[in-house]
Amino acid sequence: MDLSKKILFAGDPHGNFKPLIAAVHQHKPKAVVLLGDYDLESPLETSLQEIVELTEIWWIAGNHDFETPDKHHNLFHSTLAHKGLHLKVADIAGIRIAGLGGIFLGRVWYPPQTPKWANKQQYIDAQRPHIRGGEMPLKYQCAIWHDEFHALAQLKADILVTHEAPGSHKHGFSVIGDLASAMGVKHIFHGHLHENYAKVIKHSIQVYGVANAAVADLAGNTISV
Ligand SMILES: [Zn+2]
């Protein structure tokens, strides 16, 4: 087996899972990691039913996955919900992969600005009592929270997958490179910006952007099927 195909990374499907499904049939990876923005009209396992028994499926969420209660439910209450990598490190086919889903939001934290809230509890406590008891609005659930980001930085990993881009992209955030460096990460794969590219950032960290509905292998090569 071609070792670079042992894990594949899927850029924002936005409802189109065909390239990922075809790549799994062709390359039979041990695992796939999805980089967010699914726009799910049915539960994730239904969209991926052709491959769900063929490979391990891991994921992080993108901003689109918080757009409506249905899209959110189809991801976070799917049978693959426990395969979410956000703020975690998992051993995936022998490689430690860390995940950071969501996006930076001005109303929560937009680096390099100071965070608006230290953590979710501080935000909740500042709300009116009738709101405090309910679920945090999806818009806020979608955000990257300063304290959680720094807790992730305490962990160690080989690869970091993010929805947002690091400073390698003009719309990226250099704090993601700092996070990767703190974690000992050597490779970052990200989605969101719909662009395939490879770039090296500070600390010799290799970044791969994966375009919408594109699939990349561990060496950052775009898989064509
Ligand atoms: Zn996105």
Image (tube, grey):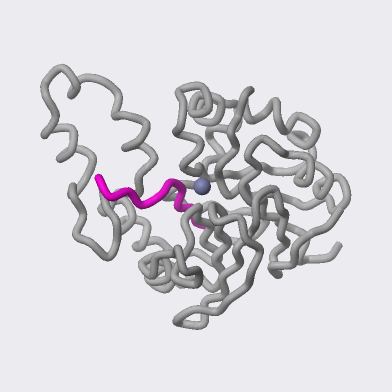
Which quarter of the image is occupied by the N terminus?
Answer: bottom right
Nearer to us in this view, 61 or 30: 61
Question: Outermost residue, top direction?
Answer: 130
Q: Is residue 38 above or below residue 152?
A: above
Q: Which residues are magenta?
A: 98-107
Q: Which residue is pictured at 15% across the width and 40% down the height?
A: 122
**Residue 105 at x, y = what percent?**
32, 48
- Residue 218 appears in which quarter of the rendering? bottom right
Q: Is residue 103 magenta?
A: yes
Q: Taking 41 as reference, is 88 left or right? A: left
Q: Which residue is pictured at 18% across the width and 50% down the height?
A: 116
Q: Is residue 100 magenta?
A: yes
- Residue 140 appears in which quarter of the rendering? top left
Nearer to us in this view, 133 or 171: 171
Q: Is residue 164 above or below residue 175?
A: above
Q: Taking 83 as reference, is 21 left or right? A: right
Nearer to us in this view, 194 or 47: 194
**Residue 203 at x, y = what percent?**
46, 82
**Residue 75 at x, y = what percent?**
54, 30
Nearer to us in this view, 114 or 93: 114
Q: Which residue is pictured at 85% across the width and 53% down the height?
A: 27
- Residue 96 appears in which quarter of the rendering? bottom right
Q: Magenta-highlighted stretch: main secondary structure?
A: loop
Q: Which residue is pictured at 78% across the width and 66% down the height?
A: 3
Q: Is residue 44 above or below residue 23?
A: above
**Residue 84 at x, y = what percent?**
52, 41
Q: Taking 18 as reference, is 57 left or right? A: left
Q: Taking 138 as reference, is 209 left or right? A: right
Q: Is residue 194 above or below residue 218?
A: above
Tally the numbered discs.
0
